[in-house]
Amino acid sequence: MPVAAGRRMPLAARPSLAPPDLRLTQDAEGRPRVVLEGVWNLRSLEPFLPDLEARLAQHGRSAGWDLSGVSTMDHAGALLLWRAWGRRMAESVDLRPEHAPLFEHLQLPDASALPRRRRQWGGPVLALGHATLALADHLVGALLLLGRISLDVLHLVRYPARTPWREISANLYRTGAQALGITALVGFLVGVVLSYLSSQQLRSFGADIYIVNLLGIAVIRELGPVLAAILVAGRSGSAMTAQIGVMRVTEELDALAVMGIPHTLRLVLPKVAALAIAMPLLILWTDAIALIGGMVSAQVQLGLDYRHFASSLPDAVPIANLWLGLGKGVVFGILIALIACHFGLRIKPNTESLGMGTTNSVVTAITVVIIVDAIFAIMFSDIGIYS
Amino acid sequence: MSEPIIEVRGLWTRFGRQVVHRDLDLTVYRGEIIALVGGSGSGKTVLLRQMLGLETPARGEVRVFGRNLHEGDHEELRDLRSRWGVLFQEGALFSALSVFDNVALPLRELKTVDEGMIHDLVLMKLCMVSIEPRHADKMPSELSGGMVKRVALARALALEPELLFLDEPTAGLDPDRSESFVQLLQGLHRELDLTVVMITHDLETLAALSDRVAVLADQKLVAACSVPEVLSMDHPFIRNFFQGERGRRALETWKERNREPAAPAPSPAEQESA
């Protein structure tokens, strides 16, 4: 039980901390009179609320109400009585003088005063419409951002001194150098698994030697670029969105704007440029490690000599595949950074939007990478492959 | 003196090598309004966080409602936490919830109050801090700084607390709002037997509201007494803080107001003796 009773009374003189209670009596003229006792504050009312509400409702506001036996009352207690009286004061109330001010706050508007959020009717149709509009909105937004960055690049061509080298270098380190470990690990394991599975199949056809062609083409042309891009999208894309989003929440973007520093030039462009440079390098690295993984596995499974693997690789895989992979890397890098920044800039200053924006950014970036990869595959289907 | 609500005994707070509080003692009694003052970086907010159990003392103990905040039953501490309300410096409204839902959250957490009652309680609290019902479905990011503060106060008051912690309650409010804030707090203090611990730099609020002033300087409490007593003390920080040009003016207005018999907002001390 809380020690909540008694206004400025010495401890000993405190009335008992009786739970809130009421009983019906009659006054001298035989009219009903409701006598309230105990502590009527939220903490002691709270366990009995439904019960008390029902009992209070039995007595109308026309009865006499004797509240002088209430030892402690707060706004919640006053409100409970006021609601029982039909949202106004009862006709005759005996109050302790110190409880009177509690009833002064009670000129409350009823439920209609609250603006209600409009319900969405029409369900799926509206949802589809909203989704389509949102997609269009995103496309326009991303296009505008791309345009803005292109203008920034033109601006930098005219004033090369304003190039944000330091930011580009920092981003290059964060998105490139620091991603070497994870891309190496994933690349190596994928190389091992791919080589292991393929070599089992190839051996049953006696086509052991084609493991080099299979691995080389798959890794250099497709797997390396896509793996690295997905890892970078998850790793750096989310970080970029969250960074820009938090800067929006803490008004840092506005601070940049009022200093006359365009945030596309200082925040977005360095990220795009850094990823456009780092991505092909990471792909080269992932390719190399994945091929090493494949080589190790092939040696174990098929007894294929390392030297033989390495020397037959250039003949098995035309060099065009490497250029294609690296070219895709540049495009993926630009896309990932653009999407991350686009979502970051759209984050609204609340925590939920930040979480949703980051998720959407990563999901979109990975989806777009795979879609664009498919487009590349169709466009360059007759390049780099012996027919 | 009435019963102590908060007891801070021999408190040491350390952040790495830096000592914020060195053997600090403070007692807050039921029904009083105590103001914590001190220069910036003197550890006012940290002391408040210690009283809230958000920091752990390096040495010493903090007891609130007679209970150590870092020991004991989880349920009991939870119960204890529903007996106080806190107004954070920046409001700390939940940005994903509307104004109404922010104030309703502590009530809904009780799980026993029905929606109709919650609705009326929230509206009443919002009216008390003069937020109009039409703002109730706004999100915190759509509010002005002063409104955020008032909504945060409404949320702090939602559970009808016995103890209220205020961190810079009037910072960022215009003078008119500060005045009505002072009146609101005086009213609440009268009606609810509220104990208030507040950090403030605003001398007018301090002079109008506080029964006692606790002055933090040199990692310690250099004073914890009424405004006139603090004024008579000779300590470099107190001299600078209260006896600067602004300080003198604020205190003079307060003295004049106290002298008038029909003062618009009598101090709680007067109320008590009346």
Image: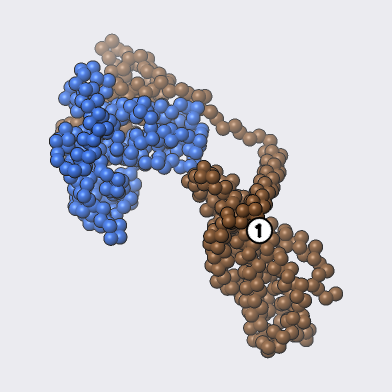
Image coordinates of residue A239 in percent, x first then y, are: 54, 57
Image coordinates of residue B15 in percent, x first then y, are: 30, 57
Looking at the image, which residue is at 19% across and 43% down? Answer: B236
Quadrant the N terminus of chain A occupies: top left
Looking at the picture, does residue B151 appear above or below residue A310?
Answer: above
Looking at the picture, does residue A151 appear above or below residue B224?
Answer: below
Which chain is home to disc 1?
Answer: A
Instruction: Report which colour depicts chain B.
Output: blue
**Residue extending furthest top?**
A29
Looking at the image, which residue is at 56% across and 49% down? Answer: A263
Looking at the picture, does residue B197 appear above or below residue A191?
Answer: above
Image coordinates of residue B197 in percent, x first then y, are: 27, 39
Disc 1 residue type?
A: Ile
Residue B37 visible in this rendered orientation of the protein: yes
Residue B108 visible in this rendered orientation of the protein: no
Q: Mark 1 points at which residue?
A: A334
Instruction: Report which colour depicts chain A.
Output: brown
Assess disc 1: are there few (<14), some (14-19) or many (≥20) residues with their C-alpha within 10 Å of its C-alpha. many
Residue in the foreground of this view, choosing between A127 and B229: B229
